[in-house]
Image: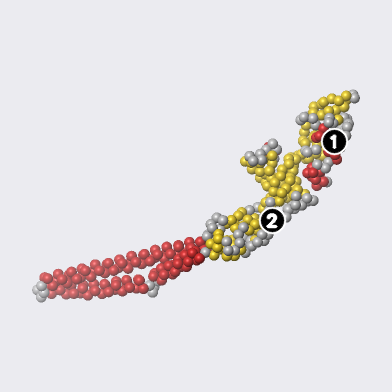
Amino acid sequence: MKSALYLALLFGLTAVACAHRTEGISPTYQSLTEAVYASGNIYPRNEYYVTADATGVLQQRLVNEGDSIRKNQLLFVLESTSQDARQQAAANAYRQAQANLGAGSPVLAELDVQVRNARVRLNNDSINYNRFRELYAQNATSRAELERAELAYTLSRNNLRAQQNTLRRNRDQIRLDVANNRSQLVSSEVAGNNTRVRSFVDGKVYEVYKDPGEVIRPGEQLALVGSGSRLYAQLAVDESDFGRIRPGQDVVIKTDAFPDKVLNAKVRKIYPKLNRTDQSFRVDAEFVGDSPASYYGLTVEANIIISQNKRVLTIPKSYVFGTDSVWVEQDGKKQKVRFQKGAENFDLVEVKGGLHEQSKLIAIE
């Protein structure tokens, strides 16, 4: 019964509407569903354009329109010779830096030999200096010989310190080189991963824009994907009706692609910005129960249910003159009578006062 009512509401098939030119009809009690008309399209949730983050030639296209995809699934592969070369150079530099810091490092080994040699020379010069001091104390050598031994000892001590500082400085520099080269390698690997384009969502591929062999640049769109099962209706509601829309209201939807199927939904989100092009507001409706097939952009017509009255006094809308008047036959004369309006839809108007079941309405051509 409910579905039949909705179909009548959507397509204006009420019996009263067909008979509105009959003279002398009277108001009748019946169900009246008040609704706001809206039109729009069906879109998937989590919709986004797959874009490239690197420059290269599209080597592989691993999906086609209509394919189902999983999160993190590989969709496209780009070939970038320059990026591969940069990544290889970064890997080589990192390996060399690690080798320079390791136990068998030729750089550090050479510096370590120089430190050991400087230490041996210092030890010899220290012994020689002490020997000349003792000889000088015994007047067995000259002051000049003692000073030459002292100078050699001083120079050897300074040389050892210099060699130790050189070893320490080079070791610190190599550690810094290892860290920098590791960072560059990670960056190049990330850039290399950008040539492997993956999906962010579970869903469906709706469009593919590029073919293998095409040159791809950063930011270029490769495909349109979105949720394959989670769909919603994006509706446009006229500015004059927008103030009556509330979240949670029932929505009856019909698509051109499936004309025999009526879909049920609920208002989930109302957008406050007016579209000045067609003087409408955007309203999103989430499907309840059955959803349409996951085709992108299906055109829909919808009725957003404002109120449902099971038994109210009604008259055909075509008999209303102006906004709140009708012509009635009384005592054999035609009279214009004002009445109090209630809810209304495309065909019927609720009468809240001014008319009764015995009133005889007439149509004025």
Give x and y (percent) for residue 285: 69, 47
Q: Quadrant of residue 342?
A: top right
- Residue 179, image x, y percentages: 42, 63
The answer for how far apart the CA atoms under marks 2 and 1 are is 44 Å
Element type at marker 1? Answer: loop
Q: How many marks?
A: 2
Instruction: Name the kind of residue labelled 2 in the image.
Output: Ser
Tell me which residue sits at (27%, 67%) in the image. Answer: 162
Mark 2 / mark 1, whichever is N-terminal:
1
Residue at image coords 81%, 34%:
318
Which mark is in front, 2 or 1?
Answer: 1
Quarter occupied by the C terminus: top right
Name the residue carrying label 2: 229
Query: From the viewer's perspective, is residue 216 above or below residue 233?
Result: below
User: In the depicted view, which residue is nearer to us: 133 or 282?
Assistant: 282
Amino acid type of disc 1? His
In screen coordinates, is 72 left or right of 158?
Answer: right
Secondary structure beneath label 2: loop
- Mark 2: few/some/many CA within 10 Å (<14, 14-19, 20+): some
